[in-house]
Image: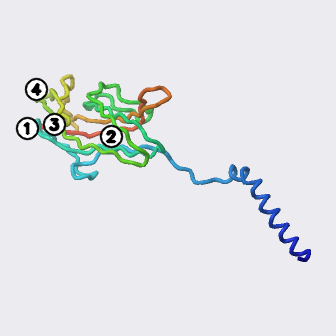
Amino acid sequence: MDLQNYRVIFMTVTGILALLVASPALSRLLVLPQTEFFTELWLLDSNHRAESYPFDIVRNQNYSVFLGIGNRLGYCAYYLVEVKFRNQTQSAPDSFNRTPSSLPVLCNITAFVADENVWELPLTFSFDYKLNATLSQIEFYSLTLNDVTLDIGNHTATWDSTENGYFGYLFFELWIYDRAISDFQYHERFVSLRFNMTDS
């Protein structure tokens, strides 16, 4: 072999060794695509679409929706959904301050959802209520959710003359189990359904 061949081999070996030595430092400088970790929460109508949600509610009639959670956190997560009900003047979750509603929880729904998986629950619900004698407000008795009757007797809905209706909101707050504190924390997500309670 002549000197020129040795020079090429020497330069190639030196270049490879330099890359191997520099690779840990280079990996800190290179910007690789970052994976975004998040949770999805949704409600779909009875046809699995985001279109025909129940709105004009008739007393003791059943309505159906689907509640869903999509886990994109990178690990199996333990979720809690708090079911709550409010009228147009009561507190909703605060998206700006990232806090849940202060209203009492009607019931809890829990689910383990593996990473990159979706969990979905069909919900059937109905309301029992009456229009008071002066026609000024709806007085609620109960909410039946998947055949479980929940007391909402402390709720009323006053006539809204601007929008011509008695309005109520069924909403679902998402909480996630935090191993560091061994408890659930509000996951800053909620979905809701708005209803006009008809006097039928």
> Which amino acid type is shown beneath numbered disc 3?
Ser
The answer to whether marks 1 and 3 mark residues whose Cβ atoms lie closer than 8 Å is no
Q: Are marks 3 and 2 in contact (CB under 8 Å)?
A: no
* Residue in the foreground of this view, choosing between 64 and 54: 64
Which quarter of the rendering shows the C terminus? top left
Task: Determine which of the numbered discs, if any, sits on residue 191 in the image.
Answer: 2
Residue farthest top in this picture: 154
Are the residues tagged 1 and 4 within 8 Å (C-beta)? no
Tell me the residue that label 1 is attached to.
200
Percent x, y for residue 146? Answer: 19, 37
Q: Eyeballing the image, is 93 above or below 69?
A: above
Q: Residue at x 30, y 31 (%)?
A: 108
Question: For this view, does 177 lie left or right of residue 129?
Answer: right
Label at residue 41: none
Q: Residues within 10 Å of mark 1 (few under 14, many from 20)?
A: few
Q: How is the image coloured?
A: rainbow
Q: Which numbered dot is residue 132?
A: 4
Question: Can you give x and y, in whole percent of width and height, for residue 62 in the image?
Answer: 14, 41
Instruction: Of the two numbered discs 4 and 2 on the same chain, state the one appearing first in sequence.
Output: 4
Amino acid type shown at disc 2? Val
Q: Are marks 1 and 2 in contact (CB under 8 Å)?
A: no
Q: Which residue is mark 3?
A: 126
Residue kind at label 1, given as amino acid type: Ser
Q: Is residue 68 left or right of residue 12?
A: left
| x, y percent for residue 140 | 16, 28
Along the viewing direction, whichever of 132 and 75 lies nearer the viewer: 75
Of residues 76 and 102, the one drawn nearer to the viewer in this rendering: 76
